[in-house]
Amino acid sequence: MTTPQLTKNQSLVFDVLEKAEGPLSAYTILDKLRDHGFRAPLQVYRALEKLLEYGVVHRLESINSFVACAHPGDDCHSHGIVAFAICESCGQVTEFHDHEVDHRLMSWVRGQKFKPEKTTIEIRGLCEACAA
Amino acid sequence: MTTPQLTKNQSLVFDVLEKAEGPLSAYTILDKLRDHGFRAPLQVYRALEKLLEYGVVHRLESINSFVACAHPGDDCHSHGIVAFAICESCGQVTEFHDHEVDHRLMSWVRGQKFKPEKTTIEIRGLCEACAA
DNA sequence: TTGCAATTGTTATGTTATTACATCAATTGC
DNA sequence: GCAATTGATGTAATAACATAACAATTGCAA
Ligand SMILES: [Zn+2]
Ligand SMILES: [Zn+2]
Ligand SMILES: [Zn+2]
Ligand SMILES: [Zn+2]
C-alpha cells in the first residue's frame, strides 16, 4: 500500500507516535494533542484507523496501544507477518519478522482451510537492559 | 501446573466457558451468571484470573475474550506457545501449537537477550465453513 | 479459641472504544 | 456558478472492558 498525503489530524497523531519512545494508548495521544486542538477520543481513533490502514502504524493488541512502524518505506510488511517484542518494564518495542514463522503458520492455516485476515504475534517480557 | 479444586465462582465461570461455542467476554459471562448470584464484573475477573493461572482458560488478546482450553489434562502448554485461529464470522476458535514456530521465536528472542514472559499468537480470519 | 489467608461481596472508578449527528472543505458534474 | 457528492472534522453521549478500595465471610491451622 502506498501512503497518501496525510491529513492534518493524521499527521499530528503520526508525529506523536514517531517521537514517542514506546507505544502509546489512544488516550495518551489525545492528551498530548490537546494543545493542538484535540478534544475527543474519536479524533485520535479516526486518525489511527487510517494510519493502520496505510501500514505506517501498528496496533499492539495485548497492551491496547499503538506504535509507529519501525520499518518506514520498507515493504517488508507485505511479505509476511510482523512480530513484536514488548518490554513490560520500559515499554521498548522491537518489530521483526521471520519468514519461517510465517511459513509454518500459513501452512497450518492452509491445512485447516482457514482464511487468515490479520495475524498478531506479540512477545511480552523484559528487554536486555531491564532483565539485568 | 496442576489444577487445584476450583472454588464455587471459579467453577461457575469455567462451566460457562466450557459450554460456550466460542469465546466470551467477561461481561457476557457475567450476564450468564446473574441467575447464580453474580452481580459485579470483579466476580468474573477474579475467577478468570485463577483459571488463567491454572491454564484451563485462555485469554484472546485481540478480541478481549476468554475460552476454555481445548486440551484439557494435556500438558502441551508447558512445551510451547499456544496459537489460536479465530473465525471473525462464527467465533469458532481453534487452538494449536507448532514447535518450529516456538523454536524460531525463542531463538530470535535469545539473540536479542530478551526475556519472554508471555507470547500471543492469534490469527483472525474466516474458518472453512464461513469462507465458503 | 484465636489468628491468618483465601475467597467473596459491593460500590465506585478508571480505561478503552464506538455511535450518532452536525459541520466543514474539496471535488465533480451540470 | 452551483447543487451534489465525498471525505474529513467537531462534539456529545454512551458502550465496553477492567481495576481499586474496602468490608464481610469462610476455612483452616496454631
Ligand atoms: Zn512495521
Ligand atoms: Zn526494558
Ligand atoms: Zn489450551
Ligand atoms: Zn466461521
Image (cartoon, coloured by chain):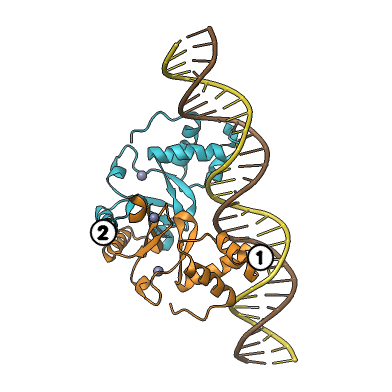
Chain colours: A cyan, B orange, C yellow, D brown
Q: Ligand 2 appears in which quadrant?
A: bottom left
Residue B122 in the image: state x and y as whole percent.
38, 57
Q: Which amino acid lies under the numbered mark 2 shown in the image of this protein? A: Gly
Ligand 4 under 8 Å from disc 2 Cβ: no
Q: Residue B104 at what x, y percent from top left?
A: 27, 60
- Mark 1: give few (<14), some (14-19) or many (20+) Cα within 10 Å: few
Circle 1 chain: B
Residue located at (37% from left, 33% from top): A3
Given the image, on which type of amino acid does mark 1 rest? Answer: Arg
Task: For the residues labelled 1 and 2, say whether their Cβ atoms are less than 8 Å apart.
Answer: no
Query: Which residue is rendered at x = 44% and y = 51% of the image?
Result: A60
Decide if residue B58 is on the left or right side of residue B95: right
Residue at 53 percent across and 78 percent down: it is B6
Q: How many marks?
A: 2
In this rendering, the answer to whether B29 lies above or below B71 is above
- Foreground: B45 or B72? B72
Residue A32 in sight in this render: no
Q: Nearer the viewer, residue B92 or A26?
A: B92
Whole-angstrom CA distance, mark 1 to mark 2, is 43 Å
Residue B108 lies left or right of residue B92; in this view the side is left
- Secondary structure of residue under mark 2: helix
Residue D8 spot, x, y in % from top left: 49, 29
Quadrant where the image shows the N terminus of chain B: bottom left
Give the label on residue A65, or none: none
Query: Tag on residue B39?
Result: 1
In the rendered image, residue D1, in percent from the top left (x then y), is placed at 53, 7
Left of B119 or right of it: where is A47? Answer: right
- Which chain does the residue under circle 2 lie in? A
Q: Name the residue under label 2.
A: A111
Is any atom of residue B48 visible in this view?
A: yes
